[in-house]
Image (cartoon, helix red, strand yellow):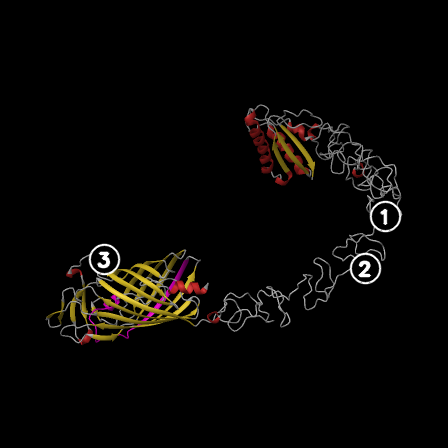
């Protein structure tokens, strides 16, 4: 996978155009965000020639410091050669340097023609793989002013021309730094899009330049890759920004790359300057004050030549030390790079054949075969009779197929009855007992009926049988009479091992009659096998602490009648269920003083019509309730109805009435924890006393804390 990644990264190598930073990844002026794999050394040489048929000056000449004008020849050669090297110290980090050499043809009346070094550049680039189709990258360069100040006429980069228009052709004459952000999209390896933006900073003059580029690589994995890019650079200036953009390098770059053998690449490209499409007036051109050669000469120039041609040869050398399959042989020397983990390999990284049987360990199912033995395609010694014992160990090499054999390959007959174990269905037959072809005794259960007539060949010894060899079973329950403790079970009745009817819950009622088959063990049951509840209160007798409760009476979890108001009279018999604590009552549960019953107060509470507001007289009853709740530890449930309201509004109004009383009591200092409220619509729910419910507006249900 890494080698495929490396190929994708290096399929297109950069060309040194008259502008642009040297790159070491795919693209020409718009490099990829990817880096080379760790340990890869990339070397390239590039040649570019500006060839647009025009002079190097837009005025067809130049003016010297004395005001003299000198004409220039057309087609003056202006070439660039660049040597570039990069090395990937990590999978996502690459370091490099480049050194250009420039050449200028004859410049009349000057000594500017000839060759000269350009500025040395050191670069570093980091890659951030976001996913398999998208990558981000960050690169930085440091440019050193190593270029010649004596040669050259055409400035090779935009930052060679300062804000006062002074310039050198082959150097910026200042150190500079550059930071770039890259991004790359790979569409299924058919189309790659690369783009970048960057800022170059002149460390002495503090000028800044905006660099950018974007382009497509079509069929990046094919022998021929097509490339189309746009790129440029322009200074950041506070005035005439548009003019600076138009007279700065801005070009379209078509090209193609040929993928040669052994990770070598040939790239041919052309730069088409913006001024090829739009004629630039001399007044709008870039005015250059050239300092090369110790003298100043002046001329106007376009940001980019109209046409340029470039050729790049590049190659990658693999010095990686990675070992993807962890077999101890580094990838670049590994002839079998996908060896499974833990496999023994030779110095070339391929699986070995330790037993020298001609079958590699990776597929050898018998890796310790003695030397010299013939083996099959699995690497195991031959076994002609297929008995599982190799020929070189088999003392009986012609054993019949399918027969059981012992450790030396001879037929195995454990019980010595003449039937081999593989075909012996009874390989523990008693010695000297006659057996059939299947190796089983002729009368297997020794009941006197031979197997060929015995319909029950496994009858236990000593059991009485019928003429068919089957145990006698008088009641037909499946338990032989000799073992049946209940020999008269009813036909179809389920029985246990002893022949007696099953009683799964052991309550004394057989399962066939038991309507409650999972009764807990030890409890009393009726004739149907169900637990007894004599008072029908839902609590079984053995758990009922009050077994004589009247039917329908409210009870607690122990089966005892509830006494909600704690007056000693159970709710089912209490004619006044809202009696206050410590009140004196009669036999019916009613207080001798009516004001000691909460529901006496409830009947004194009235609402205004269909409203939720109380009539003024109702507050006296509420205040009495407040008084008694302050005196005694009692909780209170507030129930309200709205019998005079329509069906749609009854629930809402009854709930709001109950909430109104609740809020009033809370406001008077009664804790919310002691109160509950609920609305019941048009009618209060039934009780034992009020079996059909009640249309009273208010009911109180007290309970002890």
The residue to which callout 2 is attached is: 416
Check if residue 147 falls in the magenta segment.
Answer: yes
Q: Left or right of 30: which side holds 588?
A: right
Q: Nearer the viewer, mark 2 or mark 1?
A: 2
**Alpha-carbon span between mark 1 and mark 3:** 111 Å
Q: Position of residue 540 (x, y in %)?
A: 78, 36
In the rendered image, the vertical position of residue 384 relative to residue 612, given as above or below: below
Q: Position of residue 98 (x, y in %)?
A: 32, 72
Q: Left or right of 483: which side holds 376?
A: left
Q: Nearer the viewer, residue 341 or 431?
A: 431
**Alpha-carbon span between mark 3 and mark 2:** 109 Å
Pointer 2 or 1: first along the chain: 2
Q: Nearer the viewer, residue 227 or 619?
A: 227
Identify the image quadrant of the C terminus. Answer: top right
Query: Picture quarter containing residue 419?
Result: bottom right
Check if residue 375 falls in the magenta segment.
Answer: no
Pointer 3 or 2: first along the chain: 3
The residue to which callout 3 is attached is: 242
**Alpha-carbon span between mark 2 and mark 1:** 25 Å
Q: Position of residue 391 (x, y in %)?
A: 68, 66
The residue to which callout 1 is attached is: 460
Dots 3 and 2: beta carbons under 8 Å? no
The crowding category of the residue bearing disc 2, from other C-alpha atoms within 10 Å (few below 14, some 14 to 19, many at least 20), is some
Task: Identify the element where label 2 is drawn.
Answer: loop
Q: Nearer the viewer, mark 1 or mark 3?
A: 1
Which residues make up the magenta segment? 134-162
Residue found 69% across the figure and 61% down from its top: 387
Residue found 64% across the figure and 26% down from its top: 603
């Amino acid at each position: 996978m890494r080698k495929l990644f490396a190929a994708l990264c290096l399929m297109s190598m950069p060309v040194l155009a008259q502008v642009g930073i040297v790159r070491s990844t795919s693209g020409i002026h718009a490099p990829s965000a990817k880096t080379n794999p760790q340990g890869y050394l990339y070397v390239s040489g590039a040649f570019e020639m500006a060839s647009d048929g025009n002079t190097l000056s837009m005025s067809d000449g130049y003016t010297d410091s004395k005001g003299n004008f000198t004409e220039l020849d057309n087609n003056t050669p202006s070439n660039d050669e660049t040597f570039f090297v990069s090395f990937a110290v990590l999978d996502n980090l690459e370091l490099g340097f480049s050194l250009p050499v420039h050449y200028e043809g004859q410049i009349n009346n000057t000594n500017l023609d000839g060759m000269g070094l350009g500025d040395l550049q050191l670069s570093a680039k980091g890659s951030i793989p976001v996913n398999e189709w998208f990558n981000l990258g960050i690169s930085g360069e440091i440019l050193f002013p190593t270029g010649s100040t004596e040669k050259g006429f055409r400035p090779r980069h935009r930052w060679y021309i300062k804000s006062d228009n002074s310039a050198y052709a082959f150097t910026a004459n200042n150190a500079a730094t550059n930071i770039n952000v890259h991004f790359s999209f790979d569409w299924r390896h058919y189309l790659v899009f690369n783009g970048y933006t960057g800022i170059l900073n002149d460390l002495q003059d503090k000028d800044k330049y905006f660099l950018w580029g974007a382009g497509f690589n079509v069929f990046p994995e094919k022998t021929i890759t097509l490339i189309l890019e746009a790129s440029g650079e322009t200074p950041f200036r506070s005035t005439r920004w548009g003019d600076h953009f138009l007279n700065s390098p801005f070009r379209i770059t078509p090209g193609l790359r040929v993928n040669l053998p052994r990770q070598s690449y040939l790239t041919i490209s052309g730069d088409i300057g913006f001024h090829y499409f739009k004629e630039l007036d001399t007044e709008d051109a870039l005015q250059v004050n050239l300092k090369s050669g110790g003298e100043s000469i002046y001329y106007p120039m376009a940001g980019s030549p109209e046409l340029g041609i470039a050729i790049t040869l590049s190659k990658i050398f693999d010095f990686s030390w990675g070992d993807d399959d962890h077999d101890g042989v580094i990838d670049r020397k590994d002839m079998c790079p996908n060896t499974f983990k833990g496999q023994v390999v030779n110095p070339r990284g391929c699986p070995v054949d330790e037993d020298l049987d001609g079958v590699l360990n990776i597929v050898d199912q018998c890796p310790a075969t003695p030397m010299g033995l013939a083996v099959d395609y699995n690497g195991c010694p031959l076994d002609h009779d297929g008995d599982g014992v190799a020929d070189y160990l088999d003392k009986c090499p012609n054993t019949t197929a399918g027969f059981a054999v012992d450790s030396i390959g001879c037929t195995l007959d454990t019980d010595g009855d003449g039937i081999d174990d593989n075909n012996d269905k009874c390989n523990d037959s008693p010695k000297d007992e006659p057996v059939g072809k299947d190796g089983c005794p002729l009368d297997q259960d020794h009941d006197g009926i031979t197997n060929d007539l015995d319909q029950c060949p496994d009858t236990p010894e000593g059991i009485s049988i019928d003429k068919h060899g089957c145990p006698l079973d008088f009641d037909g329950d499946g338990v032989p009479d000799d073992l049946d403790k209940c020999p008269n079970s009813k036909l179809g009745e389920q029985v246990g091992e002893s022949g007696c009817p099953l009683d799964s819950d052991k309550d004394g009622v057989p399962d066939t009659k038991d309507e409650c088959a999972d009764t807990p063990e030890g409890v009393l049951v009726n004739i149907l096998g169900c637990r007894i509840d004599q008072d029908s209160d839902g609590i079984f007798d053995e758990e009922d602490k009050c077994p004589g409760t009247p039917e329908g009476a409210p009870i607690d979890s122990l089966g005892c009648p509830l006494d909600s108001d704690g007056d000693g009279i159970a709710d089912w018999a209490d004619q006044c269920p809202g009696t206050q604590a410590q009140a004196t009552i009669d036999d019916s549960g009613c207080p001798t003083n009516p004001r000691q019953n909460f529901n006496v107060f409830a009947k004194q509470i009235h609402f205004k019509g269909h409203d939720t507001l109380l009539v003024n007289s109702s507050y006296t009853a509420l205040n009495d309730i407040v008084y008694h709740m302050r005196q005694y530890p009692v909780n209170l449930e507030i129930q309200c109805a709205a019998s005079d309201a329509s069906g749609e509004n009854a629930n809402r109004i009854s709930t709001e009435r109950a909430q109104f009383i609740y809020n009033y009591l809370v406001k008077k200092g009664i804790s919310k924890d002691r109160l509950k409220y609920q609305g019941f619509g048009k009618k209060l729910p039934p009780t034992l006393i009020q079996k059909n419910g009640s249309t009273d507006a208010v009911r109180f249900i007290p309970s002890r804390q």
